[in-house]
Image (tube, rainbow, N blue to C red):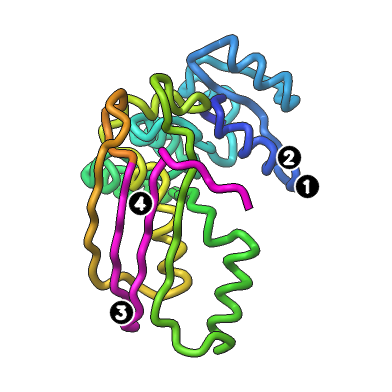
Amino acid sequence: MAGAGFFAQFHADAWQRLPHANITAIADPDARRAKAFSEKWNIPRVYSAVDEMLDRERPDFLDIVTRPDTHQPLAALAVQRGIHVICQKPIAPTIEECQQMASAAHAANTRLIIHENWRWQPWYRELHRLIAAGRFGRIFHVGFRMRTGDGLGPAPYQTQPYFREMPRLPIYETLVHFLDTFRLLAGEIESVYCATARLNPVIAGEDYTLIQLRFQGAAHGLIDANRISVIAPS
C-alpha cells in the first residue's frame, strides 16, 4: 500500500477481511504515521519511499491511497516494474495525466484499476436489481442529496485537512461517487448542467453544488450537495 492517511484505514480493514489477500508493506513519507499504521494493521514492513518498497517487495499489485496529485507518478513507479495498480479516485487532477496513466499501463501490459466502490455497495446493487426487474416501472427521476457538515468554521475538514487547499472539491473528490452510481441506476449520462459556489471563505475550492442531468433513457437526475449543512436529526 502507498499512503497511510485517513482513508487508508478503510483499505487496510477491507484487505484484511479477504482470506487470500496479504498486505506485505506500507509506504508513506511520514515515517511515524507509517509505523503507527503498520502496528495497527499488523503490516510487517514499513517504507518511506514507494520505489524502494516496490523494488524490495515485488508485490502482485500496488494499492494507491494517496492525494490525487500523487496518483500519476506513483502509478508510473509500479507499471515501470510490471506491477499492477489499484488506485483511489479521482484518477488524477487533469485528463492528460489520466490518459498518461492509462497509456503507460497499456504499454506495460499491466492493469490499472480505479477504486470506485459506491456502485458495489449492497444497497445500490439491490436497487439496481429491482430497477432491472421492473419493480418501480419507468424510471423518470433519480436524486441524491448530500449534507456532510464537515465544512463549517475556520478549520474545516478535520479528518482530511488538505481539502481546504484543493482548487476543486465536492465534484472532484466526492460527487464522482454519485455520478458513477447514477450511471448504474439510470444509464449513461447524455447531458449535464452544474452550478457551484464557495460558502466557506477559508477554503480554496467550492463546497456547494447542484448538478442536473439527463440520461440516455430520457430519465432526469439531480444531485444537491454541500459540505456546510448538517443532516437534520430524524
The answer to whether marks 3 and 4 mark residues whose Cβ atoms lie closer than 8 Å is no
Mark 1 or 2, closer to the camera:
2
The kind of secondary structure element at disc 2 is helix
Q: Which residue is mark 4?
A: 106
Query: Marks 1 and 2, Cα distance to the nearest angstrom?
Result: 7 Å
Q: Which residue is mark 2?
A: 16
Nearest to N terminus: mark 3 or mark 4: 4
Q: Which residue is mark 3?
A: 216
Nearest to N terminus: mark 3 or mark 1: 1
Q: Which residue is mark 1?
A: 19
The kind of secondary structure element at disc 4 is helix
Q: Residue type at mark 1: give it.
A: Pro
In the displayed structure image, the side of residue 140 where residue 148 appears, left or right: right
Q: Residue furthest top?
A: 32
Q: Residue type at mark 4: give it.
A: His
Residue 216: name its quadrant.
bottom left
